[in-house]
Image (cartoon, rainbow, N blue to C red):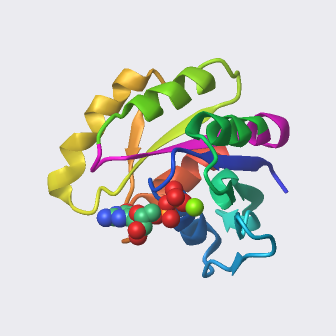
Amino acid sequence: ISGITAIVGRPNVGKSTIFNRMIGERKSIVEDTPGVTRDRVYAKAEWLTKEFRIIDTGGIQLDNQPFKEEIQMQVDIALEEADSIVFVVSGIDGVTKDDEYIASLLRKTKKPVILAVNKIDDTQLQANIYEFYSLGIGEPIAVSGVHGIGIGDVLDSIIDSF
Ligand code: GDP
Ligand code: MG
């Protein structure tokens, strides 16, 4: 195992879709406690002969949990368990206040942060990625989790981050 990476981001940006793409399996949802949605959270992945682990930190959600608490939980898991972080945002929504809040937390860590701009489903949306430079996280990578576009670029960056 060459390292562990953690996927973080606000709800609905496509974290689980990207996670599932990277592990190449279908998502399995297990609901064992009422009020808790537990998607598959930890998985092994392989890329370019390297084996690593991925955590979908959004995979455990409590009902009615305030946004800041949920994000803090995600970031805490990432900082404790991962060597690098994949920060997912939505290229359809553009930069939101919640993205800026998450970026402010992630800018404090010394761990490498990879910025994945998801929902770039076709080339016309490509120009939407540039506004994400304003988050101060670095170069945005265009991704479409649904169509499997750009996933290889994110995987390359993950391998480089270890
Ligand atoms: P999460 O809450 O961050 O884990 O997000 P999900 O992976 O559950 O996805 C949230 C919604 O966004 C779902 O309806 C997905 O189908 C949709 N979605 C995910 N990736 C993409 C994408 O690349 N393009 C588009 N158009 N929709 C996407
Ligand atoms: Mg999810």
Q: Residue at x 46, y 33 (%)?
A: 98
Above or below residue 116? Residue 124 is below
Q: Residue at x 47, y 53 (%)?
A: 153
Compare residues 50 and 98 and report the one nearer the observer. Answer: 98
Image coords of residue 132 (percent x, y): 35, 32
Above or below residue 8? Residue 124 is below
Q: Residue at x 23, y 48 (%)?
A: 126
Q: Quadrant of ligand 2?
A: bottom right
Farthest top residue in view:
108
Q: Residue at x 51, y 45 (%)?
A: 10
Write down the quadrant of residue 40 in the picture.
bottom right
Above or below residue 29? Residue 74 is above
Image coords of residue 46 (percent x, y): 70, 66
Does the magenta-highlighted stretch encompass residue 123?
Answer: no
Image coords of residue 51 (percent x, y): 77, 62
Magenta-drawn segment: 77-93
Does the magenta-highlighted stretch encompass residue 85?
Answer: yes
- Classify the position of the C terminus by image quarter: top right
Q: Is residue 142 visible?
A: yes
Q: Is residue 133 left or right of residue 28?
A: left
Write down the quadrant of residue 147 in the picture.
bottom left
Looking at the rendered structure, the number of numbered marks drawn on it comes to 0
Q: Is residue 46 left or right of residue 134?
A: right
Above or below residue 21? Residue 98 is above
- Classify the position of the N terminus by image quarter: bottom right
Write down the quadrant of residue 68 in the picture.
top right
Compare residues 121 and 158 and report the one nearer the observer. Answer: 121
Q: Is residue 105 left or right of residue 84?
A: left
Image coords of residue 138 (percent x, y): 46, 27
